[in-house]
Image (cartoon, grey):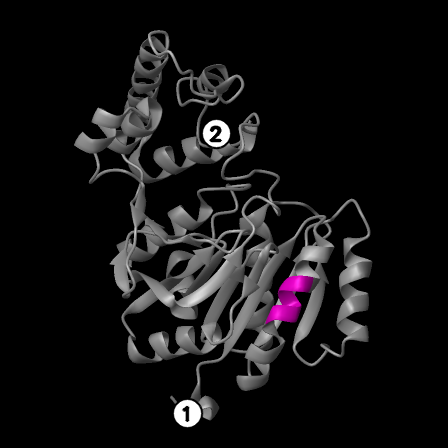
């Protein structure tokens, strides 16, 4: 593809108290943007309680990134979707980008990734959303995309028992991916590119999600409007998982209330309250079975603190789609 005719892209990074990570992410984009000079970056600072805004603004000025990077203070921590929507509206008002690339602060972009993404979108006008091949903080490949959550995936997730996971393997949310592009249900919001027309069709992101499930919701709405979602392994991004959210992939910390709020909202808003209740029942049944079998195991699995209690407190039995 001729670089002069490449689609215009705006990169969006939502920051909350992770200035050093944002600066490192921006540094990884320098050579990519030099090759595609129409690319711009908007950093939304969601009312960080530290000096993030100052650190990021200083880095942009001192490293001469002002031609392509702009910091926008939101004045309020409304969450991931809220911050991204500020950037979407700003870019749409000032210019007409063809694509938006959502990047977590705790990401680093590998050389050639931007070109691979632009080439793919240019060749496939039916594609609305594309996700990257991610590497973890130890630079190990994390080749996953995802299926949409369902009552069956909730049973599998709650049980986490080998035989049930094997029986329901076609319903498990994580999908192990290969080395070729493939159409999937949804991709990680750590590195997600969405076409402007897709965003316009879906009405931007749902700001009722504070954190988590917002990209799942976006991909589902995009599908309803006829857009496809793809996993692109040639677009490689390092993701130090959990650094920007406070959660880690392998951690056993207590799950925050907003995760349960987001899960509940996803099921109610997209499938109705009855389905959400059934999904809750499936998860609880699976988890209780796991706890029962755990009593008879010589080797005890580690347990997320207060998981069952927090799940019930955040379930559709007690709340509607809105955050508590």
Secondary structure of the residue carrying numbered label 2: helix
Mark 1: few/some/many CA within 10 Å (<14, 14-19, 20+): few
Mark 2 nearby-residue class (10 Å; few <14, some 14–19, many ≥20): many
Q: Nearer the viewer, mark 1 or mark 2?
A: 1
**Position of the N terminus by quadrant:** bottom left
Q: Secondary structure at mark 1?
A: loop
Nearer to me, 119 or 290: 290
Q: Position of residue 84 (x, y in %)?
A: 56, 57
From the image, tell me which residue sits under label 1. 2
Query: Which picture quadrant has residue 245?
Result: top right
Can residue 88 be spotted in the picture?
no
Q: Which residue is located at x 25 percent, y 60 percent?
A: 183
Q: Which mark is residue 260?
A: 2
Q: Quadrant of residue 141?
A: bottom left
Quadrant holding the C terminus = top right
- How far across and how far down the image is residue 138, in percent? 53, 51
Q: Is residue 311 magenta?
A: no
Q: From which residue to which does the magenta span run?
A: 24-28
Residue 170 seen: yes
Q: Is residue 248 above or below residue 102?
A: above
Q: Residue at x 76, y 79 (%)?
A: 64
Q: Indicate whether 148 appears above or below 264.
A: below
């Amino acid at each position: 593809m001729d670089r002069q005719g490449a689609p215009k892209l705006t990169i969006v990074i939502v920051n909350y108290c992770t200035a050093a990570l944002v600066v490192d992410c921006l540094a990884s984009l320098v050579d990519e943007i030099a090759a595609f000079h129409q690319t711009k970056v908007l950093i939304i600072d969601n009312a960080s309680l530290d000096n993030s805004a100052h650190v990021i603004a200083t880095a942009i000025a001192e490293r001469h990134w002002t031609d392509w990077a702009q910091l926008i203070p939101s004045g309020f921590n409304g969450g991931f979707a809220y911050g991204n929507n500020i950037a979407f509206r700003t870019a749409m008002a000032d210019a007409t980008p063809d694509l938006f690339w959502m990047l977590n602060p705790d990401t680093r972009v590998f050389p050639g990734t931007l070109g691979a993404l632009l080439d793919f979108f240019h060749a496939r006008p039916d594609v609305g959303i594309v996700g990257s091949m991610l590497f973890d903080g130890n630079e190990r490949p994390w080749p996953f995309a995802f299926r949409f959550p369902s009552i069956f995936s909730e049973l599998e997730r709650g049980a986490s028992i080998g035989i049930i996971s094997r029986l329901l393997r076609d319903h498990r949310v994580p999908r192990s991916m290969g080395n070729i592009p493939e159409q999937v249900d949804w991709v990680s919001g750590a590195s997600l590119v969405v076409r402007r027309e897709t965003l316009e069709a879906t009405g931007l992101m749902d700001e009722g999600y504070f954190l988590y499930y917002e990209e799942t919701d976006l991909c589902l709405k995009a599908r309803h409007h006829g857009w496809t979602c793809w996993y692109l392994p040639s677009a490689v991004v390092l993701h130090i998982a959990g650094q920007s959210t406070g959660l880690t992939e392998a951690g056993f910390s207590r799950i925050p209330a907003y995760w349960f709020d987001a899960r509940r909202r996803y099921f109610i808003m997209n499938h109705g309250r009855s389905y959400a209740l059934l999904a809750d029942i499936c998860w609880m049944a699976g988890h209780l079975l796991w706890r029962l079998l755990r009593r008879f195991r010589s080797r005890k699995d580690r347990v997320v603190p207060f998981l069952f209690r927090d799940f019930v407190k955040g379930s559709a039995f007690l709340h509607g789609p809105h955050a508590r």
